[in-house]
Amino acid sequence: MEGSARVLGTLALSLATFMNVLDSSIANVSIPAIAGDMGVSPAQGTWVITSFGVANAIAVPLTGWLTQRFGQVRLFVASVILFVIASWLCGLAPNIESLILFRVLQGLVAGPMIPLSQTLLLASYPPALAGIAMAMWAMTTLVAPVMGPLLGGWITDNISWPWIFYINVPVGLLAAAMAWSIYRTRDPGPRKVPLDSIGLGLLVLWVGALQIMIDKGKELDWFASGQIVTLAVVAVVGFAFFLAWELTERHPIVNLRLFARRNFTLGTLALSLGYGLFFGNVVLLPLWLQQYMGYTATWAGMTMAPVGLFAILLSPVVGKNVARVDPRKLATVAFLVFGLVLWMRAQFNTQAPFATILVPTFVQGVAMAFFFIPLQAIVFSGLTPEQLPAASGLSNFVRITAGAIGTSIFTTLWEDRAILHHAQLAEQVNPGSLTATQTLEQLGAAGLSPEQAAATINRLIDQQAYTMAATDLFHISAWLFVAMVAAVWLTRPQRSVGIGAAEAGAH
């Protein structure tokens, strides 16, 4: 593709990707408003997020089979249009049951959109510009999760929560119309391929059980809950049967044989572990700011917003050089800068001003620019054109699941570490402590009753405990990012990495 057609095609695919990724996080801050309007508890309201995540996780790895069955362009445009319809229905939902049902539909039809936007974008650019194509895709995929809570909070506060779904309608219709007008002549069309119904059933079973376990684990106190133990058993057994079936099936619903390729396996592993750590921290920082630093949802979102600045400026530069520079070196830069960012955050305390909290966010943009593009180049290294949609679907599935697991682990560890720090700090508040008795006396002199003074001290201990717990996790994350450099250097990407992927898409 050349000229305006390529620009418009890139815009259409980016709009659809942005809308899809945004929808995975935009509802998070709106749950209290949705639950209040629907007359249900916030715990029931979280099913609005869980239902989308489960359905989306099931649909993403099916991209390879669906592409063969319906054709790349037809499937992509149909997914976007169905996503628009599901979004509109979500906004109109009269009760929580119908909203959850429409969110399941939205998650299912959203599945193929991200992998196909990736493969169609690679097909739009000549081999020499494959890195640029990946840079465009990476920018939308990384900036959207950060923008979601900020935009969702603003819409919920200033308009009403159904509009977090309604905004998808014009964006989706525009993206679908543009994509169809530009790409329809490039679609190879549908092929008759057998449906692996047993593989599909097992996929739905184990992925559904895993996602519900991840989303509900913290709320139900993990393995202290019989429900979580049951889900874990179903997920493990279902996965074992799925693995055995798919590796012996002649026409598998998910092509697991891609994991026999060293670059695909290690590249996907590095990408997913890095994304899980990144996403866990993306969720943790605004939670800490809102709950213990007195930030509003909007201001907490503002601390995350500048992350896109360096990512947008540097991604085209990285994309341009990914074919010339060893992608392992570029990915190493990403992991080391992520390590630096999290080490800077590990120095935070309860007195940290807004500017101090903002600096690591700016620096994180550099890491994001170097993160996605080289790792995707390693993942796609040496794949044939037929393997691209399946590879993209499978690697995105592992990445999205890692993001969900990262979020659950981080929020659970944060609370566990905070309980430990709270107990240790509370031990210092005793009759033998001069500081504690003086503080209680000062609070009493200010007119507080002994109970009110004790509650004030407890709030201060809570703030310190949760801050110390957050900095513990930032510190651990910093070292994990540095350690993950080793996984990148175990890969052996081809010299023309990135170009190979583009050539595959261009034919």
Image (cartoon, helix red, strand yellow):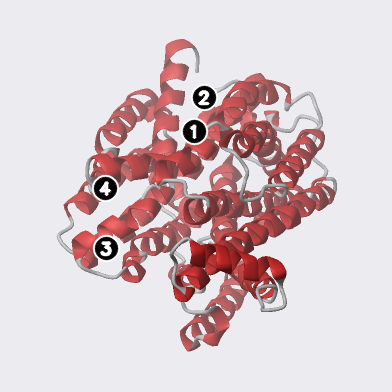
Q: Report if the CB atoms under discs 2 and 1 are less than 8 Å apart.
A: yes
In three-dimensional space, the C-alpha distance between marks 3 and 4, rounded to whole angstroms, equals 18 Å
Q: Mark 4 highlights which residue?
A: 87
- Secondary structure, mark 1, is helix
- Pointer 3 residue: 35
Q: Which residue is mark 1?
A: 120
Q: Residue at x 68, y 50 (%)?
A: 274
Asked if the residue at tag 2 contacts the one at tag 4, i.e. Cβ–Cβ closer than 8 Å, the answer is: no
Left or right: 359, with 140 as reference point:
right
Residue 1 position, x and y percent, is 50, 18
- Locate the C terminus by quadrant: top right
Residue hosting label 2: 124
Q: Secondary structure at mark 2?
A: helix
Image quadrant of residue 438? bottom right
Q: Mark 2 belongs to which amino acid?
A: Ser
Of the image marks 4 and 2, the number of the one nearer the N terminus: 4
Lower sequence index among marks 2 and 3: 3
Q: Is residue 202 among what the camera can see? A: no
Q: In the rendered image, which quarter is residue 380 located in?
A: top right
Disc 4/disc 2 C-alpha distance (Å): 28 Å
